[in-house]
Image: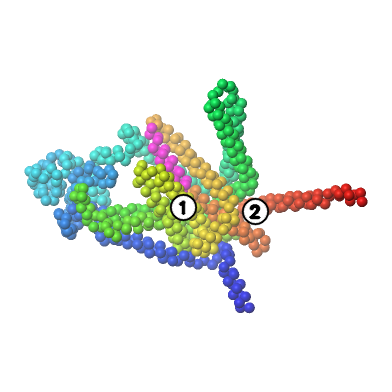
Amino acid sequence: MDSQQQLYLRRKRTKREWRPLEDRSCTDLPWLLLFTVFCVGMGSICSFTIVTGGAARLVFGYDSYGNTCGHRNELIEGVRLSGLDHTDRKFIFFLDPCNVDIVQRKIKSTALCVSLCPTEELKTYQDLKSFAMLNGSELCSYELAGHKYPDLPERFFKCPKLPVPPSKPLPVFNRCTPVDISCYAKFAEAVVTFVSDNSVLHRLIAGVAASKEIIIGLCVLALVLSMILMVIIRYISAVLVWILTAMVVLGSLAGTSVLWWLYIDHRLYGNYTTDQVKEEAELNSENGQALLVYAGAATGFTIILLLLMLFMRKRVALTIALFHVAGKVFIHLPLLTLQPFVTFLALLLFWIYWILVLLFLGTSGNSVQNEETGLTEFRLTGPLQYLTWYHAVGLVWITEFILACQQMTVAGAVVTYYFTRDKNRLPVTPILSSVLRLVRYHLGTVAKGAFIITLVKIPRLFLMYIHNQLKGKENACARCLLKTCICCLWCLEKCLNYLNQNAYAATAINSTGFCTSARDAFVILVENALRVATINAVGDFVLFLGKVLIVTSTAFAGVLLLNYQRDYAEWLLPLIIVCLFSFLVAHCFLSIFEIVVDVLFLCFAIDTKYNDGTPGKEFFMDKALMEFVESSRRFGRAVERGRSRVKEAVSEGAGRKPMAPGMSSA
């Protein structure tokens, strides 16, 4: 008896049972530890840059001899004029600030630490001397005495280029920057290459400056429209879906009709001459055959499309029902609309931190003398140069981790909504409850899923970098191979993203690890492959129409508000800014809506697989989905009755066959 019980328990453990919101436990703890260690490594890189002086060199600046401005410095072996006390010299001054290296995007001039930036133009070396004597700020090299500037022969290459433009220090980074930035015109021309006429650029910028209040108002309008659309899309989804269906059917029928008309027209009027040369006759015949092939292919495509529309109309109805329920989710869980803001804020803070540490790394390491300019720079050498690669991997992994946390949070809230029969008994804040469950139980699962995406994204980015570096140098075969690899990795990344999203939903339901959840979700999706294809195709197009609706509405409002400006050229840049921002906002908000629809479908598929509506196995689904299930059942029963009648008719017909002639005469 004990062995039978053990066998029963073993089978019970191995069989996957979907237990919504029960038996919550920690998942993928080793991956959480690995991700924590990795984040500690990212923090250690920042600490390294601070301890070794890289952060101080970036913030306070350093001269061409390795001295940090505003600090007492230590002597650097082999570097002259190093180890100086610059406690009173807090600003960086460039002898030739307009000597910009466009390729490397940095100033090639000698840099000095000075106590004061020149606020007025200095035209002569006598002016340099007077400035040094009055303000105590010597603008020539350290070994030159300020009162001897006009008489020293070294003044031509160790003093600033005349005239010295007036400058002001930057608020944080203490660099003396020319007030008139016209000396950076060459750099600006290299950056803004699409503008050939400076007056056009000035007019565009003036249009933005004059319309900044309107631009801000239109951006807020796009934000409001996106939030409203997520709530009302359940009322217009049916209209959008059937408009899409009608457009596809009418378009395919029109295309097929045009091809057949061209073929018939070619047959009737293409051979009206009798004295054609043989080559023209053969060409005419080939054109006719090509039109016949195109028309036949279009006819086959149209027939297949019409059959698909006929057999998949129920699945299209499921998409409409899911959109309807998704709109209800946003009504019951209004904090879902804040998810794009929270995710964007988290990404923004992390990206700012990442860029700052990257800049710190650029001024960390050992002092190296530039062979071209002879100036002292700081570079990471030896094993330290791999810190930049580690930092780059951290950018991808942590970014994907933040996005995965958003998906898990939304999935947890939607799962709570779906599997709560009485919606009045929902938690006060399902979103916060989902966040707490994520932090307490499932951070390891999110870290593992984000790492899998990172493993695919980094090779793709590396191949894209190689493709850009070799542009114009590689042969056609290598270019085709690179593009093929990039495209395949992109497709794989999209598929993994979709599977990961469903794996997070399965984890939110069953509290299982990433691999188990991904396998279970994959099985459910394969069992409902046609439904998945329909929801993705129709749903994505409906959401795309929603984005187009928001962009066009915002652009139309922008045209009305900008109408008072008679110079229509000034409309261009403000409208481009508004349209780009409105599309970005619409994409962020409707992406949340798409996640909600996908999670609802997974819950619906699980609900219909393990429940049938009988006592003890009641459905969890919403009324709209219940109506869809009942309609599908009625349709299935009608099909079964039709099949049984056909079988009965066939059997009756077989029983009424006439007897053989020999038997009748007998």
Q: Pick the residue in front: 659 or 105.
A: 659
Let me know if residue 321 appears in the view.
Answer: no
Find out whether residue 146 is within the magenta segment: no
- Label 1 and label 2: CA atoms lie apart by 34 Å
Residue at point 56%, 55% (across, down):
525
Residue corresponding to mark 2: 629
Q: Position of residue 428 (x, y in %)?
A: 52, 59
Magenta segment main secondary structure: helix
Q: Which mark is residue 14?
A: none
Crowd tier of the residue under label 1, counting other residues whose Cα lies within 10 Å: few below 14, some 14–19, many 20 or above: some
The N terminus lies in which quarter of the figure? bottom right
- Residue lying at the far front in this picture: please name it: 278
Q: Position of residue 405 (x, y in %)?
A: 45, 57
Given this view, does label 1 or label 2 mark the residue nearer the observer?
1
Residue corresponding to mark 1: 493
Q: How many marks?
A: 2
Let me know if residue 253 appears in the view.
Answer: yes
The boundaries of the magenta stretch are 569-588
Q: Earlier in the sequence, mark 1 or mark 2?
A: 1
Residue at point 11%, 49% (across, down):
144
Residue at point 43%, 64% (across, down):
32
The answer to whether 291 appears left or right of 70 in the picture is right
Residue 576 location, quadrant: top left
The amino acid beneath tag 1 is Glu
The answer to whether 281 appears left or right of 465 in the picture is right
- Residue lying at the far bottom in this picture: please name it: 1
The scheme the figure's colours follow is rainbow
Crowd tier of the residue under label 2, counting other residues whose Cα lies within 10 Å: few below 14, some 14–19, many 20 or above: some
The answer to whether 378 appears left or right of 498 in the picture is left
